[in-house]
Amino acid sequence: MPDASDVPSDIEIIKQRKKDGIEIPLQKNVQAKATSTYLEYVKLVHNAMPEIDYDDIDTSTKFLGHKFSAPIIIDSMTGGTDEATIINGRLGELAEKYGLGMGLGSQRAGLKSEELAATYSVARKNAPNAFLIANIGGAQLAKGLTIDEARKIVKMIRANALVVHLNPLQELVQPEGEPRYKGVLAKISELAKSMDVPVIVKEVGAGISKEVAIKLEMAGISAINVAGAGGTSWAGVEKLRAEAMKDDIKTHLGEMFWDWGIPTAASLIEVRKAVKLPVVASGGLRNGLEVGKCVALGASMAAMAYPFLRAAAMSRENLFAFADTIMAELKSTMFLVGARNIPALASSRYILTGALAQEVSSRT
Ligand SMILES: Cc1cc2nc3c(=O)[nH]c(=O)nc-3n(C[C@H](O)[C@H](O)[C@H](O)COP(=O)(O)O)c2cc1C
């Protein structure tokens, strides 16, 4: 029989799961396989006579009362391990220097100890003025995470907003997952009424439908991040974990639902039409041209997770070079459609083609 010192503590189990959550996306290919964002079906119309100088282009924008130098958010990712401390430190520094938003990973772990809390709060240390977004899970809310705990999570990073992530697919495939969502809407509504910061609701790679968006708007939240299909697959991440743990059913489910979800562009278009709330586009965005397309489709902000993780894990220099490239791509897109600023980009003409056009016209 193992003695107590052989049994991993709660904190050690959390640390290992968080470690997997960074290492699997970095070391294995867990991107969408047979689906995509559908952003390749969005064509922005070329303007041969832009009547603007590249250097005069202004990418700044406002979201939830905060000014950003570009409509870009580093999407919610990590915390809870030593590696996460380095990554969150670098991402925080980038958010501060470039005027971008940044989401932290699910912070329930940070409630367990000061040591774990520091793996998140390092972002605020490096980003005293940036728009930082705290993170809790919808499943944890449904299970009984209290308003008081949510307030502690916000305080941990002096957050400007709180995100609730909805991840039913991940909970389903995760070997230790808790696929229990009963009562989640009432909890989100209570949270929206009780917090002093705006509450945003996001998916983690399977998209938000118009039906869900309408319920969320009625619950009083402040913004929706669609985080659709076409990028990082959490069914994929959890499938690999299930395989390593020899959980055959979860491995099978992970493979079957690897590409499950609403492609990002389709989710963005239907949520944009269904609600008045600001919408954040995320899920598989990989460059500044795609950021530009999302803004043209009606997104207030665009978020990316995996590309920032990959760059940040390599080096600080790599991360900053990646951000420079995205900014140049976004500005180039604006130049080529003749948009001097973000409102002009938001009203620029686009054409929907192929599977996206079909999907949009068949979604009633
Ligand atoms: C390493 C990693 C960790 C993530 N952890 C979280 C998390 O803790 N909370 C959350 O809301 N989303 C989390 N996500 C999901 C992202 O915020 C995003 O919604 C999703 O990955 C789609 O974006 P992408 O295709 O650009 O990666 C994570 C993503 C990655 C890549």
Image: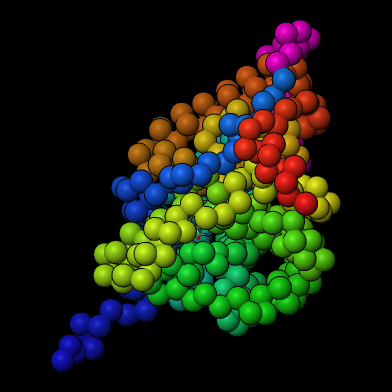
Residue 323 versus residue 182 in the image, above or below = above
Considering the whole magenta stretch, tell me its main secondary structure: loop
Residue 108 is situated, as x and y percent measured from the top left of the image, at 51, 71
Which residues, given as a range, are shown in magenta? 46-64
**In the picture provided, is 280 more to the left or to the right than 134?**
right
| Quadrant that contains the N terminus | bottom left
Q: Residue at x 74, y 13 (%)?
A: 47
Would residue 237 be found to the left or right of residue 62 on screen? Answer: left
Magenta run includes residue 59: yes
Q: Find residue 123 and report its horizontal and vertical position in percent.
A: 51, 52
The image position of residue 22, as x and y in percent, is 38, 54
Residue 107 among those drawn in magenta: no
Which sits in the foreground, 61 or 282?
282
Marks counted in the figure total 0
Q: In this view, does 351 lie above or below 332?
A: below
Question: Which residue corresponds to the image point at 57% horizontal and 23% vertical from the top-left?
Answer: 328
Examine the rendered structure and indicate whether residue 329 appears above or below residue 196.
above
Residue 213: image quadrant is bottom right
Q: Quadrant of residue 266?
A: top right
Would you say residue 300 is visible in this rendering?
Answer: no
Q: In terms of depth relative to the viewer, which is nearer, 191 or 265?
A: 265
> Is residue 241 shown left or right of residue 328?
left
Which residue: 73% across, 37% down?
Answer: 297
Q: Can residue 101 be seen in this view?
A: yes
